[in-house]
Amino acid sequence: MRTPGEKRAGYEFARNFVILFLNAAAARIPFHAIRLFLYRRAFRVGTGSSILMNTTIRGFRISIGQGCVINSGVTLDGRGAALTLGDFVDVAPYVRIWTLDHDPDSPDHVARARPVTVEDYVWLASGATVLPGVTLGRGCIVAAGAVVTKDVAPWTIVAGIPARAIGERQQHLVPRKPYSPWFE
């Protein structure tokens, strides 16, 4: 008979293997429909959403709304806390969204987990980084290369390191057609 510790170790091994499979194999499958089928077995992916090749998945606490596009080279971290993407979110290539970091004041480098929420119609441009504990308000835009350390108000455009407001976005957006490439 297995002890509770042995059962937990087996469970953790299985979870780690699934993440390894998603990142080493599924992320490189050139057929979008097959890749999406596999991702939907691991976490919630809404209808009409696309996850392009070479996306890195870290953890299972990820929820993606409908009509979202997750481009190539993106890192989605759902290890420490929930990562929630609303509907019609555009995530450009090489964006990193983190829910887990380390306490810089901790003598033993203890991990900190804080959720990240990306509301509907948000656009994250190439190379942006979103740090743990941030909420990106409805319709905001995060400029290329920006590092978001604090919440962003709805319909605000932010840029820089750390990200600061540089403008406002028009509020009359409509849902776009789903982007479902055969190979990408």
Image: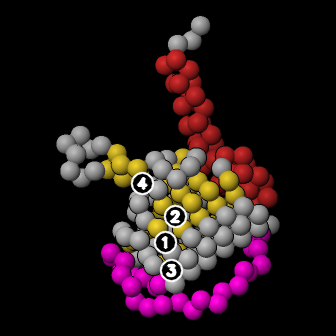
Q: Which mark is residue 154?
A: 3
Q: Secondary structure at mark 2?
A: strand
**Magenta stretch: residue 129 in it?**
no
Q: Secondary structure at mark 1?
A: strand
**Magenta stretch: residue 176 in it?**
yes
Q: Secondary structure at mark 4?
A: loop
The magenta span reads 156-181
Q: Secondary structure at mark 3?
A: loop
Q: Amino acid at mark 4?
A: Arg
Q: Amino acid at mark 2?
A: Thr
Where is the N terminus found, in terms of image quarters? top right
Q: From this viewpoint, which residue is outermost toward the top?
A: 1
Q: What residue sits right under mark 1 in the picture?
A: 136
Q: Do callouts 2 and 1 mark residues in contact (Cβ within 8 Å)?
A: yes
Q: Is residue 184 visible?
A: no
Q: Earlier in the sequence, mark 2 or mark 1?
A: 2
Question: Residue visible at 45% across and 72% down?
Answer: 128
Q: Nearer the viewer, residue 86 or 67?
A: 86
Above or below: residue 51 compared with residue 159 = above
Q: Which mark is residue 114?
A: 4
Q: What residue sits right under mark 2 in the picture?
A: 117
Q: Earlier in the sequence, mark 4 or mark 1?
A: 4
Place of residue 73 in the rendered image (x, y in percent of width and height, measured from the top left) = 56, 64
Task: Determine which quarter of the picture holds residue 119.
Answer: bottom right
Q: CA distance from mark 4 to mark 1?
A: 14 Å
Task: Determine which quarter of the picture holds residue 14.
Answer: top right
Above or below: residue 150 compared with residue 80 = below
Q: Is residue 151 visible?
A: yes
Question: Residue visible at 66% across and 70% down?
Answer: 87
Q: Nearer the viewer, residue 97 or 152?
A: 152
Q: Amino acid at mark 3?
A: Pro
Q: Earlier in the sequence, mark 3 or mark 2?
A: 2
